[in-house]
Amino acid sequence: MGQAILETLFDVAYLSGVLTVGFLMLRRANGRPLVRLFGAMAVVLGAGDAFHLVPRVWSLWTGGLEANAAALGIGKLITSITMTVFYLLLYYVWRERYRVTGRRGLTAVLWGLSALRVALCLLPQNDWLTFRQPLLWGILRNLPFAAMGVILIVAFYLQAKRANDRVFGRLWLAILLSFGFYAPVVFWGETVPLVGMLMIPKTLAYVWVVWMGWQLAPESGREAA
């Protein structure tokens, strides 16, 4: 009962907060592409995570996680796809923030990795409807995802440092932390349930990313420098 209460409170606060910020940013964009992109990112993040977190909360209050394996699996599938979209949007945030032009090769790589990630997620070998999915496929579908993360970590680190960007100066670190907390869950989350607790700091890393974007969306005025 304690786990159900704590997870429910955390998930409700997280989802409502991220979605509220996302919709407010979209409303306040006023023709500012960077604010609009970040708003879309936050909405995709919150809406996508809801497909996984809502069934999980429901499971904790009803028959348990294993009894709701199919709903949880479908939720994880949808969240896997929406997180891919989240990082693809983050790439365009990088381009817009630092006025990056060209780089068609890099754009093709990010789109290619996104398509590969989604394709791997959709393969039946993932066994999404079972309670314990195959570890091998958990690793395979996350390889292109991790590659996207590495590219964006390096890209944001180099550009933020070069531009002395006070708003996004630590965005690369937030991405790095999110993957750092997520990796053990991929490898050991199915066999060591306690490892799943790392999803909380992983989620907080995404909240940090959204908070950085929120600084660009005051009621009026120009985007933060």
Image (cartoon, helix red, strand yellow):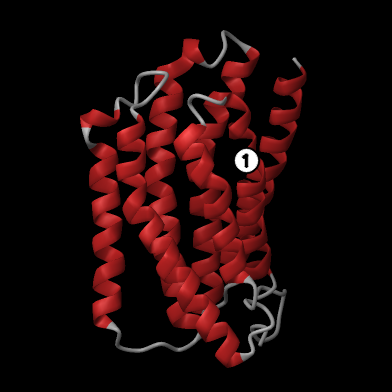
Q: Residue at x 43, y 22 (%)?
A: 71
Q: Quadrant of residue 200?
A: top right
> Percent x, y for residue 110?
31, 67
What amino acid is labelled 1 in the image? Leu
> Percent x, y for residue 18?
63, 52
Q: Please tell me whether residue 92 is drawn above or below residue 198 in the rendered image.
A: below
Examine the rendering and report whether any part of residue 186 can be seen.
Answer: yes
Q: Please tell me whether residue 77 is drawn above or below residue 47 in the rendered image.
A: above
Quarter containing the N terminus: top right
Residue, disc 1: 198
> Percent x, y for residue 203?
62, 47
Report the front residue among 31 and 125. Answer: 125
Q: Please tell me whether residue 156 is drawn above or below residue 58 in the rendered image.
A: below
Report the front residue among 92 and 37. Answer: 92
Q: In this view, does 217 lie to the left or right of 135?
A: right
Report the front residue among 225 and 127. Answer: 127
